[in-house]
Amino acid sequence: FSLSSLSCLTVTSPTNIACIKYWGKRDAGPNTPLNDSVSVTLHQDDLRTITSCACSPNFAEHMLWLNGEDCDISSDPTGRFFKVVNGVLALLCDGNDADDVSAATWSNMKFHISSRNTFPTAAGVASSAAGYAALTYGLACLILSVKSGKAVAKLENDLMVKLSGIARMGSGSACRSMFGGFVAWRAGISADGSDSLAEQIAPETHWPDLRALLLVVSDVKKETSSTSGMSTSVATSTLLSHRVSHVVPARMSAVEAAYKSKDFTEFGRLTMMDSSRLIVNMIHAYNDFFGKVVAAYTFDAGPNAVIYTTTGHLVPLLQLFLRYFPSQRDDFVSNGAIWRQTADHKVDGALADKIEHAVGRPPEIGVKEGAVKKIYCTSPGPGPRILLEKDNECLLDPETGLNTYCVE
């Protein structure tokens, strides 16, 4: 790593799915929310963004590739990409450290970024959260490595909190993807957004029995972006201010307590209360059969459903979904081992009848193959990671700094 030559590293970052959501922005400038929110960070073994960052004084301009496509960022010098780049530079390269060169030297440095997702982009699976978290984390690790002349192994928690505020400038929920496990985004009260930061409530190891099924109903780009949808809600909803001031604070306290105590019944109840009907009806019928909440649905910014549950209910739930949403694809379920277990699981006849009654038909009637595009089986996971050269996942040419990734 050196200021005088090309330096490059690769990181990964997770997505997250909110349990208590922030449907509205207090101020679009610093990208601050109306209310606190909290989410589960999903494991990167199943869904992640891979981002390679390179810097060199010889690069002519900043460049960004997303999923192999060249993005024209030069036309929007005040856009989200530059807000993140300039934010990280301002935080780490002020020239005050004994081992630092002048801030002017860093301001002349250009960055090349190539990023790809292992899950649908802009389809309501929080891809922007993972993407901007990876960009923020990757830039920070790269800059600190160049400053020290050696690879950075890990960033301290206090720095990660500060970086979460920068990731927020790219995508609000990206601040929560800066940490693993169960993560809160505190709305803050400062006009400049300086106290609108993420906080880890519990690490990914806290609740090892927790599982999630992500049902990708649509893998195409959303017609309405999250930002546009939130702006409309703030402008038109008379109930939103009541939710922000009265409903959310109580739910935040309750859901954090439920997660810490591993009380799935309460965690699931609160998660479903904050969600925006075949899948919904199936989950309610499933819970009714067991006499308590053992599975909980929620939806992110798109139509895709996330089902939280525990290990003992993972295979039975997956089997029910496979009956109603069949597919011939070999990669339909992300976890092949769990998928194979459904073949050996005997369906409870009374449960099957209850589900059929709830949805109004048997599984063989009315659902076309492909109604669900893919099912991810996952669990709480860690925050961003630095990849080693031996992982062989770099998306940039180490000699030229140009993109090498293309969609097959």
Image: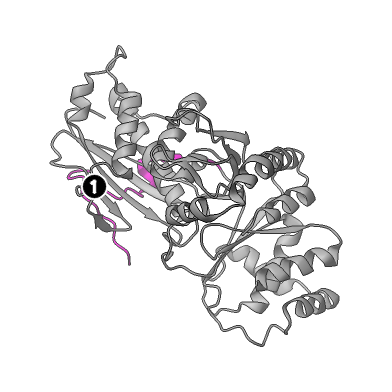
Residue indicated by mark 1: 76
Q: Which quadrant would the N terminus be assigned to in this image?
A: top left
Q: Is residue 342 visible to us here?
A: no
Residue located 64% across and 74% down the image: 322
Looking at the picture, how far across and down is residue 90, in whole percent? 31, 26
Q: Amino acid at mark 1?
A: Asp
Q: Is residue 26 visible to us here?
A: yes
**Above or below — where is 69 with respect to 384?**
below
Residue located 13% across and 36% down the image: 58
Left or right, residue 218 beside residue 70? right
Q: Identify which residue, 397 or 217, lies in the foreground.
A: 217
Q: Identify which residue, 156 or 218, lies in the foreground.
A: 218
**Above or below — where is 62 with respect to 404?**
above
Looking at the picture, how far across and down is residue 144, in whole percent? 34, 27
**Stretch of the chain drawn in magenta:** 382-408
**Above or below — where is 21 with respect to 335?**
above
The answer to which image quadrant residue 324 occupies is bottom right
Residue located 38% across and 43% down the image: 170
Left or right, residue 288 beside residue 86? right
Q: Which quadrant would the C terminus be assigned to in this image?
A: bottom left
Q: Residues within 10 Å of mark 1 (few under 14, many from 20)?
A: few
SS class of the residue under badge 1? loop
Magenta residue check for 401: yes
Magenta residue check for 43: no
Q: Identify which residue, 405 or 33, lies in the foreground.
A: 33
